[in-house]
Amino acid sequence: MLEIERIKRQILRYLAGKKATFWELINYQDSHIVNFLQAIKDLLNSGQIIYEKPYFYTATTLPENRIYQSPGCLYCHPFEQSSFWKKVLTEFEKLTIDRPLPTSDFDQGFIRPVDTLKRVAFIYERGDLEETEIFILGDDDLLSIAMAITGFPKKIVVVEIDQRLTDFILKKCREIGFDRIHIYQYNVLDPIPEELKGKFDVFVTDPVETKKGLKLFVSRCISTLKGPGSAGYMGFTHREASLQKWHDFQRFLIESGFVLTDILRDFTTYPEKENSWEDFYRTYRIMKEFDLDLPDMDWYKSCFVRMEVVNGPILLEVEVPKDLEELYFDEEAWATPLPSFLEKKH
Amino acid sequence: MLEIERIKRQILRYLAGKKATFWELINYQDSHIVNFLQAIKDLLNSGQIIYEKPYFYTATTLPENRIYQSPGCLYCHPFEQSSFWKKVLTEFEKLTIDRPLPTSDFDQGFIRPVDTLKRVAFIYERGDLEETEIFILGDDDLLSIAMAITGFPKKIVVVEIDQRLTDFILKKCREIGFDRIHIYQYNVLDPIPEELKGKFDVFVTDPVETKKGLKLFVSRCISTLKGPGSAGYMGFTHREASLQKWHDFQRFLIESGFVLTDILRDFTTYPEKENSWEDFYRTYRIMKEFDLDLPDMDWYKSCFVRMEVVNGPILLEVEVPKDLEELYFDEEAWATPLPSFLEKKH
C-alpha cells in the first residue's frame, strides 16, 4: 500500500537520525493511528527497526542522506536552521539565474525561487519526495531542477509546452549529473502519452485557472497516478479563481477519489521584477476596470493544495477547450496576459 | 452579501492603520479580484474610503481598536511582535487558570491556551471575528472567553453539554464585562433550539470524530448559519480519523454547499500535563494494541479547517447516534477514553 510506504519513509528517516519513543515518532508522520501502527509493525517484521522499550531505532546505521532534514517553518523563515536546505537553495538560485523569462503565449509566470523550494520541502515533509516517481505538468517554476538538486526522487518526468524550458531543464540536470529525469514537449490540449498513464506516486502542477483549463490540467495529471496513496500537489489562487470555482473544482476532486489534505493559503508569491512582465499589464482586464498604476509590490500569490487518492483514482470525463484562447481565458481571468497571437483579435 | 462584507472589513481595518495602494491592499484580503473590486467600489460609494491615486485611505480617522493587528506567524512564533495579541494571551491564561479539567464522560480534552488564541487569530485574519455573530458548539477549549477578551465579536453563543463549563464561561465573561454572550446547556443528540437556526456568520466546533458524530456536530452547526459567505471552522485530526473518513466528510461538506478554504495541518496540540488525563490512557484502545508506556511528550494534534458557504447551506439529513456510546466510539477511535458510565459494560 502506497500510503503505508509513505508513512514508513517518514518513520525511517526520523529514526535514521536518532532513536525515538512511540509518542515522539507519531509526531513526525502523517497517518491515522491504525496505519501508523501498521507501518511500525511492518518495519519491525522486516527487521528494519528494533523496539527496546521505550525506544525504536534502526537495525543498521543508515547513510547520512537518509536522515530527516527539517526545513524549519515554511511560512516565515524557511531553511534558516538547515545547512542541507540552505545549500539546495543556493545551488538552485545559481543554476537558474539564466532561466527563460515568461512569455504571454503560454500564460507563464514563475514563483520566487525560495517558494519553489518551499514547495519541494513541503512535498518532502509529507514523505512524497524520497524514492518516489514524480510527474510534473508545466514547469516554468523549475521545480524539477530543485527536486533534482536534493537527489531524493527515484524518477522525475516533466511535460511542458515551451521548448525553451524543456531544453533548459535538461541542460541543467545534466550539469548536476541528475539523469533520472525525462522530459516531453507536450501541449495539454493533446492526450497524455500512453506510457505515462498510471505510473506515478506524485504529480505537481500549476494549472491555468479557467474552469475548463483547470480540470483539463488536473485530469491529465490524475491519469498518471498509480492508485490509492498517490498524491497530487497544485498551486491555485484566490486572485483569479472565485470560491464558486474552488467549490466546483473540489467536487470534481472528491468525485475523482481524492481527499484534500492540505490547503496552504498564499504559500507562494510571484515576483514582479524577476518575471519582467510589466509589458503584460496593458492587456490585463483588471487594468481596464480601474485607474491603476503598475504594481509597486508583489501581489500575485497562490495557495498550495495537497490531495491524496483514497479511491481509484476515477478518471472523469472533462471538456477539452477548443483552442488556447479558451484554455487561458474565462470571465474570472482578470490578470492573465493576452497572448501575442490573440492581440490583433481583441 | 456576507462575502463582500468580510472583504470590506479586511480592507477597512488595514486602511485604519495606514494609507495603501491597490496592490498593497490586495495582499491583505482574501478575495478574488472581482469581489475585491466590488468591495473597494462599495467603500468608495458609501464615502468610507477615498482614492487619491495611487493611495486609498479612510475618510475619517477610525478608533484605534479598528486598526489591523497582525498576530505574526501563527505556525512558529505567534503573537511575539504584537502587544495587542500578547496582552490577550496573558489575560486568557490568567482567566482560565482554574478551568474545569476534562471528564471522560464527555470525551473532553483541551488544546493549549496559545493554540486557542491561534485559532481566534486565524479567524480574525480571515475577517470572521470583528462585528460577527459566532456560534460555538462545545467549548472545553474556552474559545469563547478568548474571543470575548478581544472584544471584537458582535455576539457569541455557546452551546455546551457540561454545566461546569457553561457556568465557568459565563462567570469569566461577566468578570471581564463582556455581555454579548449567551450560553445554552445543550446535548448534541437533541435538536438545535429553533431560535438559533440561520442566525450566525460563523461557527466553530471541535467535533467528536466518529463517522456519525462528526456529521451530527457539523450538521447542527450548519443549521445555524445565515447563508453564502458564512464560514465554519473546525478541529479535525489525522490521529483518529482516516483519510477515508476525511474524504467521506469532505463530500458531505461539498454537498452541503461549502468550499474548503484552509486546511492547516497539526495546527493545535493537546497538552498531556494540563489535561491531567493520565488515568484515561488505561482505557485507550491504542494502549491495548501495543506495549506502551504513558506518553513522554505531547502527541495528540489536530488540524484546523475553514469552510465557507457558497450555496445554501443545504441541510442534508444525517443519522443521529442512538446514545453517547455510538456518538463517541467507532472503529477508528483509538485514543478516546471510555466514559465511566460505560466502563462496567466493557
Image (tube, coloured by chain):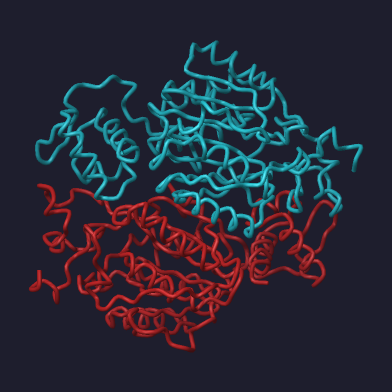
Chain colours: A red, B cyan
* Residue B2 quadrant: top left
Left or right relative to B307: residue A112: left
Residue B342 x/y as whole percent = 85, 37
Residue at point 33%, 60% (across, down): A112
Residue B165 x/y as whole percent = 66, 22
* Residue A68 quadrant: bottom right
Front one among A312 and B287: A312
Is the residue A228 above or below the residue B223 in the image? below
Residue at point 66%, 59% (across, down): A14
Is the residue B209 above or below the residue A202 in the image? above
Q: Residue furthest right?
A: B344
Image quadrant in which the C terminus of chain B is located: top right
Image quadrant in which the N terminus of chain B is located: top left
Left or right relative to A214: residue A202: right
Residue B41 x/y as whole percent = 18, 39
Residue B20 x/y as whole percent = 20, 37
Left or right relative to A100: residue B240: right
Left or right relative to B24: residue A186: right
Is the residue B326 above or below the residue B172 in the image? below
Residue at point 30%, 75% (across, down): A321
Q: Residue furthest left?
A: A344
Number of numbered discs: 0
